[in-house]
Image (tube, rainbow, N blue to C red):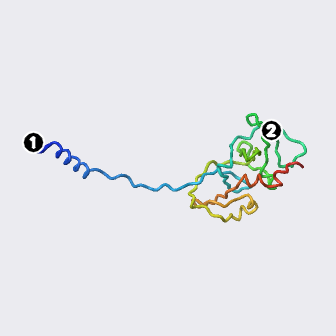
Amino acid sequence: MMDKNKKPFAALIDMANASLQLAQGLPDQHEASETWTGVAFMLAGQTMVAPMDEVAELMHLPSSTSMPGVQSWVAGIANARGRLLPLIDIEAFFGGHLSGNTKSRRVLAIESNSLFVGLIVSEVIGMQHFPVDSFVSQIPRDAASFVEYTTGAYVHEDKTWTVFSPFKLAMDRRFMNAAA
C-alpha cells in the first residue's frame, strides 16, 4: 500500500526498486561460435563433406542417356531444367563402384565457371555444421587416395569428416578429359 504522505513519484521509485529485488536474472548467455557448413556424403566408404559454396544443387538421380566414346566413369547425360548435365560416377572415377541401392544415390551438381556437371554419390547424409575451430589440415589415412581433392577435415563429436573439394576435382586434367 502506498503511504498517503509519500509523493507519487517517490512511490513509483520504491515499487521499481522492490520489483528489481524480486526479479530473476536473465538466462546464461552463451557465445555463439562460428560454424562451417557442408554437404556430407559417402565416397568409397568414407564420410566426406563438400563446401556448401561448391555444391550448386543436390538432386535425386535423374534419368539419363548414355554417351558413346566416353570414359567408363561417365554415366550419361541428363536434362536438368533445360540444361545438359553430364553425370559422373565418382566412385568409378576413383576405381570403385557405387554401393547401396539406387534409391539412396544422389547427384551433387557442381557449377564452376562454364562447367556444369553432376557427381553421382552412393548416399548423401545431409547438411553438417562444424565449429570452425574443429578444422585440422591433416587428412585421415582412410582418405589418402583422395588427398589431392581434399582441403583438410573437421573433427567433431569423435568423428572425422574429410573436406572434399569438387572444385579441385573439376580442375583435374583427367577428370576434364572424359573422352575415351
Answer with the quarter of the image where residue 34 lies: bottom right
Q: Real-space Cα distance between discs 2 and 1?
A: 88 Å
Question: For the residues carrying marks 2 and 1, which lies nearer the camera in this image?
Answer: 1
Q: Which of the two discs, 2 and 1, labels the residue nearer the N terminus?
A: 1
The residue singled out by tag 1 in the image is: 4
Report the amino acid beneath label 1: Lys
View extreme (top): residue: 82
Residue at point 74% right, 63% down? 144
The residue singled out by tag 2 in the image is: 64
Residue at point 82% right, 42% down? 76
Q: Residues within 10 Å of mark 2 (few under 14, many from 20)?
A: some
- Report helix, strand or loop for mark 2: loop
**Residue 75: horizontal and vertical position, in percent?**
82, 44
Report the amino acid beneath label 2: Ser
**Residue 168: horizontal and vertical position, in percent?**
74, 55
**Residue 161: horizontal and vertical position, in percent?**
64, 58
Residue at point 58% right, 61% down? 134
Q: Residues within 10 Å of mark 1 (few under 14, many from 20)?
A: few
Residue at point 70% right, 41% down? 59
